[in-house]
Image (tube, rainbow, N blue to C red):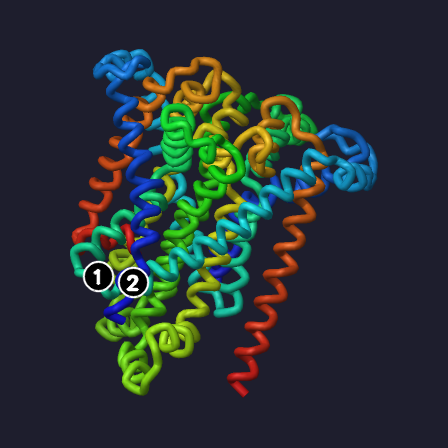
Amino acid sequence: MRGNKIASVPYALWLALFTVVPLVIVLFYAFSDDAGAFTMDNFSYMGLYAVVFFRSFRLAVLCTVACLILGYPMAYAMSRLSKTGQTVALILIMLPMWMNFLLRTYAWLTILENNGLLNHFLSFLNLPEVNIINTPAAVGLGMVYNYLPFMILPIFTSLTGMDESLIEAARDLGCNERQVFRKVVFPLTIPSMLSGLIFVFIPAVSTFVISKILGGGANMLVGDLIEMQFLGGAYNANMGAAISVVMMVVIMIFTAITNRLDSGEEGGVLMS
Amino acid sequence: MKKHTLSRTYMILVFIFMYAPIVLLMIFSFNSTKSRSVWTGFSLKWYAKLFNDSEIINALQVTLEVAVSAALISMILGTAAALGIFSLRPRSRKGLLWLNNIPMMNPDIIMGVTLMLMFIFLYRICHLPFFALGFQTLLIAHVTFDTPYVLLSVLPKLRQMDIRQYEAARDLGASNFQALRKVVMPQIKSGIVTGGILAFTMSIDDVVVSYFTSGPFSETLGVLIFGMTKKRISPEINALCTLMFIAVLVLLLIINFREFKASKEREE
């Protein structure tokens, strides 16, 4: 196969041109004004948006934790099913991804609206109506709903791919079921949990679609801010580029910390 | 036994959470009025309207065209890259795989924005009309986020393969191309197909990258729907999504039924 080096050249060029160059251009825009001169203004004005950054980060962290708490037991329950049951459950997890995610999110609007289905149901039971739509809670719910599979899938894969003989060995050595889980199964799934954290956090911290649909105008996130600078009313490509750079840095820090938590070899989280 | 019921109940609750909005959407695609929360009677009128709505049909066509072309291009690009990557020096190999991770890890919005800025830069400042936002730029963006999946599906298949088979073919007089086609190809085919299907799925599902990189005449279905969410989504879209969902469901059932039958036969 030695002579086939040339075969990877087109893709290497493609990556250079359509992945590396765009990132360089964004850096250039972030550090220049609209005349192209070097400036740090874009970053020094960013303090104005601290509230938005904080809101995005908080919601993304909450959503990631919620996905872990909801997703782990789900993955565990799925992994205890028979082989056929596992396949069916896996298909059921993946199937909603085939329905356009905008529409799935929009369907939640129908449920959560002030005169939506949830409140119809509550008043039918003579319970007080709730006001969820256009609050951060609605945006968080939309995020958990959309990104939960990203947490379940890696944990499920790690649970089903586990070497059964390790569990048997633990039992033979006198562990009860709880100890087997705590001392053998759980530690072995930590790398997959960390991948799940990354897979949920990244889309959650960068979304603008979910906050647009479920958050009304009042719950702007960093994603909305970036979109506004490019395609919304406030056209300012330099500011948009600067906010994008900050978001990338936040994600890199999050990924680095998460990877560090995994005491195993580096890069393991990305590839597993 | 009690533990069993508890985990079953939990699983069912999670599935209800995941499917409730979808089921609602499907039910209301048969509603006789535009209302999304009040049932006024059964009707198929949104389905009839759907097939006469040129905007939606056009967007569907763009979506399928771009998804199929991007999947095909990324299958070629990704497979070639996987074949070549083995003969690279470890350092360049690592570098290429690291770069390959960027489109997968980058959030959609960053990818959309960076590509859009570059296209605008190439169009306005370098005067390259090819990069005017439109179908070509949309296709470039889709190939960029599709190919990593193809590469990562083909690589493990190549690793599993016994390299000596390729060498044996060469020793027996096969040209490089013949050895690749007759010995390597059959063994990595399933990886290429898996990668292609993944790529197609990613393209169909994408909204954000397309939103930034498509032009006014190359709107995908996702972009069209996103435009609608700002006002009100037409029930025709619900009808279309119901149809697409059922198509995928049937496809999955057929594939799994065939696999099930195949594994049964193997057992016997």
Q: Name the residue nearer the viewer: A217 or B161.
A: B161
Quarter assignment of residue B105: top left
Q: Amino acid at mark 1?
A: Leu
Counting from the top left corner in percent of width and height, residue B90 is at 17, 60
Counting from the top left corner in percent of width and height, residue A67 is at 40, 42
The answer, for residue A205, to whether it is visible in the render is no
Residue that label 1 marks: B88
Residue at the image point whose x is 26% and y is 52% from the top: B96
Residue at the image point whose x is 62% and y is 55% from the top: B248
Mark 1 secondary-structure assignment: loop
Is the same chain shared between marks 2 and 1?
yes
Mark 2 secondary-structure assignment: helix
Q: Amino acid at mark 2?
A: Gly
Which quarter of the image is occupied by the C terminus of chain B?
Answer: bottom right
Q: Name the residue nearer the viewer: A243 or B100.
A: B100
**Tags 2 and 1 in contact by the CB under 8 Å rule?**
yes
Vertical comparison of B49 with A96: above or below:
above
**Can you tell which mark lies on residue B84?**
2
Counting from the top left corner in percent of width and height, residue B264 is at 56, 80
Q: Name the residue nearer the viewer: B199 or B87.
A: B87
Q: Chain of mark 2?
A: B
**Can you tell which mark lies on residue A147?**
none
Q: Name the residue nearer the viewer: A208 or B211.
A: B211
Quarter assignment of residue B22: top right
Vertical comparison of A137 with A236: above or below:
below
Vertical comparison of B235 with B139: above or below:
above
Q: CA distance from mark 2 to mark 1?
A: 7 Å
Vertical comparison of A53 with B166: above or below:
above
The answer, for residue B162, to whether it is visible in the render is yes
Position of residue B59 in the picture relative to residue B86 (left or right): right
